[in-house]
Amino acid sequence: MLSTLIYRSRLRGDIDQASLAAIVTQAQTRNAELQVSGILLFDGHQFLQVLEGPLTSVEALFEHISKDERHDFVVELMRDYAPRRHFENVGMALFDLRNVKAHAVLKSVVKSSVVPFNLAREARVYKFIRSFLRRPDSQQISRQFQPDAWRVDRTPPRPLCPLQPAAADISCQFALQPIVEPLTGKIKAFEALIRTPDGGSPAAWFASVSSDELYEVDLHSKESAFALAKAVNIGSHMISVNLLPGSLVQVPDAVEILLAQIERHGLVPQQVIVEVTESEVISCFDEFEHVIRQLRAAGINLAIDDFGAGFAGLSLLTRFQPGRIKIDRSIVTDIHLHGPKQAIVHGIVRCCSELEITVVAEGVEKVEEWCWLEAAGIKYFQGYLFARPVLNRAPSVSWPIAG
Ligand SMILES: Cc1cc2nc3c(=O)[nH]c(=O)nc-3n(C[C@H](O)[C@H](O)[C@H](O)COP(=O)(O)O)c2cc1C
């Protein structure tokens, strides 16, 4: 199968014209053996390369090139399949944009393409090349994206003595994980994550609850989360709890019950964030809409969890605009390497900025992921990079340090 792969990368250090030409000469021989064709664009700072050929050859070559130390931040932009090659000559054509004008590149690209002229202009390959020549905003990010300039303080926290659950109800416990603003060193909120009495996962806890009691038990479990917030003295920080929309819709007087729990533990509704997942909201939106109004009228904040993981995505925001959204970890993981994820996050950030919705990135584990997301305009983060959840405690945060 004939496949096409496009990536963008950043030059490490300097490269003179002779060395660049040497890469391409060597590439031409190897690519011809592998039946890979394509083009390499270089603007003095970044590369854009199109590789096309048999699927396995293209994948193996890309893996090989990605490891080349002469460039870094290799971001895959597109993988596609085509009935015919875009570029006739098997090998690799170089366009050094310091010596050749953008319109001349486009002209050669269309000319060297085997598909008819108009079709070539419609091809995504051609559009990627054109965008690279125009240097869109996304490429500016790579200049601000400086993960090498940061390290995260990994000093192991002092050993913690085991803590007892804060509430008398021992059918569940909670672990706290902070949501942080790394560049100011501030904790924004704590998320209370449910655990079984012996510390097991949320899935294990849900599995232990019978389906006819699910919503009641889910709602009443929040008592323990608020008790923990009081016990660890979260002060004026916010506390985030997860709730099934069904628990708010089906349990009579759910919002009053929640408000009473909040009050019993000396918290105020404005301090509380209720997180619901994107897929749950969209599946029962009409019933949930009434509850959203009640929660907001009482001063409780709403966040959409796992944003981007379900099928609703940005279209959900046409139906209601929560105060916060949390970008799902599946989008966050390795975002610095993945063009489609980057494009989605640019869209989310732009849309949420216009709607004054706070964006949190969750599941952040690598400095590179955090730096890329910061450069894209996100300020709030949650993930193992900064703090793991700790049972019945507020964990200490590993803050990033410059240099
Ligand atoms: C931006 C860039 C593009 C490259 N493109 C190719 C290519 O298309 N084909 C190729 O064989 N090598 C390419 N290389 C070089 C390879 O990464 C690698 O250095 C070369 O294949 C020699 O590998 P070897 O020393 O393991 O034989 C490229 C390097 C860079 C920095």
Image (cartoon, rainbow, N blue to C red):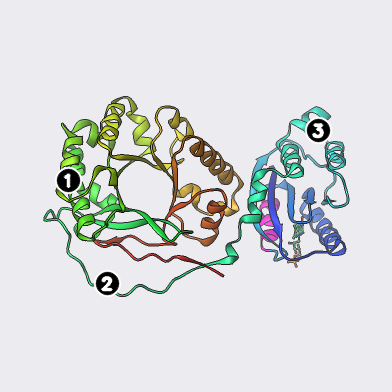
The residue where tag 3 is placed is: 115
On the picture, is 105 further left or further right than 247? Answer: right
The residue where tag 1 is placed is: 263
Which percent across, then down, holds residue 78? 65, 44
Lower position in the chain sequence, tag 3 or tag 2 = 3
Q: Nearer the viewer, mark 2 or mark 1?
A: 1
- The quadrant the C terminus occupies is bottom right
Cα separation, mark 2 vs mark 1, equals 29 Å
Magenta segment: 56-67
| 64 in magenta | yes
Q: Quadrant of ligand 1?
A: bottom right
The answer to whether the beta carbon of the residue marked 2 is less than 8 Å from any atom of ligand 1 is no
Which percent across, then down, holds residue 77? 65, 46
On the picture, is 43 further left or further right than 206? Answer: right
- The quadrant the N terminus occupies is top right
Dot 1 crowding, Cα within 10 Å, few <14, some 14–19, many 20+: few
Lower position in the chain sequence, tag 3 or tag 1 = 3
Name the amino acid type tagged 1: Glu
